[in-house]
Image: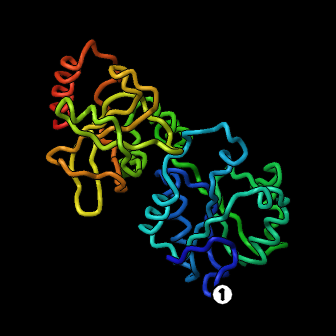
Amino acid sequence: MKIYNDPNLDKKHCNGVIAIGNFDGLHLGHQKVIKEAKQKAKKKKIPFGVMTFEPVPVMFFNNKIKNHRINSLDQKKTQFKKFRLDFLIIIKFNKIFSSQSAEDFIKKIIFKKLKCKYLYVSKNFKFGFKRQGNIKMLKKFEKKYNFKNIITKPYKKGNKIISSTFLRKKIRLGKIKEVNKLLNRNWCINGKVIKGQRRGREIGFPTCNLKLSDYVVPKLGVYSVKVKIKNFYKNGIANIGYRPTFNGQNLLLETNIFGMNKNLYNKVISIEFKKFIRSEKKFRNFKHLKEQIKVDIKQAKK
């Protein structure tokens, strides 16, 4: 998979099938779009790629929106590789790009640069200055700019359309098992281990601490997790919250890795969420907290 940071494709990647979207989370709905687009490329024997945007446009337009992302850019790249794309285009979403008219986006990027033959987008895809472009406009310009626009049917669970917004809601509610089914993998937070106040070590449960960065904040509390770092993959227990027993002020993800007592400071690790155990609460003293942690660990190991 070749990664481009602009729409200037090599000749061998032009005249192909392209799926465009934010693809935050790369959930089953996104996977459906990608699989259908890939099948088309295979049938027509032409290249297949994806175009996505960085940062996520909603976060660019509103800097008050924090803790929004389901996956980071690095995670997104890793997940796309599994689909064996021919290429991935990561467009820098900035003032210049967002100021481009909708027709210019079709004419200058889809037609002139990508030379796209089949374009796959979701039903609610918006593009161009002030989001004036939509699927009706794409349909209108199909013949003029020599491409065919294909809208895949949304992926539904029951009567609910599965979207990134839907998944964020489920993550915030702590419905991790449901989220993992809709992702077809464990939801995961990647980050660099930072130094904490070593309180966990004091009470006999050392933790790796991560900041949440731009990730959506799951329901505060305790989770059963799996921790992945280059050479190991171990079970553990994680607490996400403000540590009220210690009068903590900052949101932190603290993870105790079972059977592990290594110093992991500054190492990048992945915390995969498996199930929600209990909500965060304040304990009267460290003794009560320690007793509860033992109960939580039993739950996590089930």
Viewer-proximal residue among 159 and 205: 205
The C terminus lies in quadrant: top left
Going 65% across and 87% down the picture, which residue do you hit? 11
Q: Is residue 49 left or right of residue 199?
A: right
Classify residue 93 by image quadrant: bottom right
Viewer-proximal residue among 268 and 106: 268
Q: Amino acid at mark 1?
A: Lys
Q: Is residue 95 left or right of residue 26?
A: right
Q: Is residue 200 left or right of residue 56?
A: left
Where is 66 relative to 136, above or below?
above
**Residue 111 in picture, x, y percent from top left:** 77, 74
Classify residue 44 by image quadrant: bottom right
Going 73% across and 52% down the picture, which residue do you hit? 126
**Residue 185 in picture, x, y percent from top left:** 36, 51
Classify residue 219 by image quadrant: top left
User: Callout 1: helix, strand or loop?
Assistant: helix
Q: Residues within 10 Å of mark 1 (few under 14, many from 20)?
A: few
Q: Is residue 264 left or right of residue 205?
A: right
Going 56% across and 55% down the picture, which residue do you hit? 23
**Residue 237 in picture, x, y percent from top left:** 25, 38
**Residue 45 in picture, x, y percent from top left:** 55, 83
| Farthest residue, direction top | 284
Where is 98 relative to 282, above or below?
below
Circle 1 residue: 11
Where is 80 relative to 72, above or below?
below
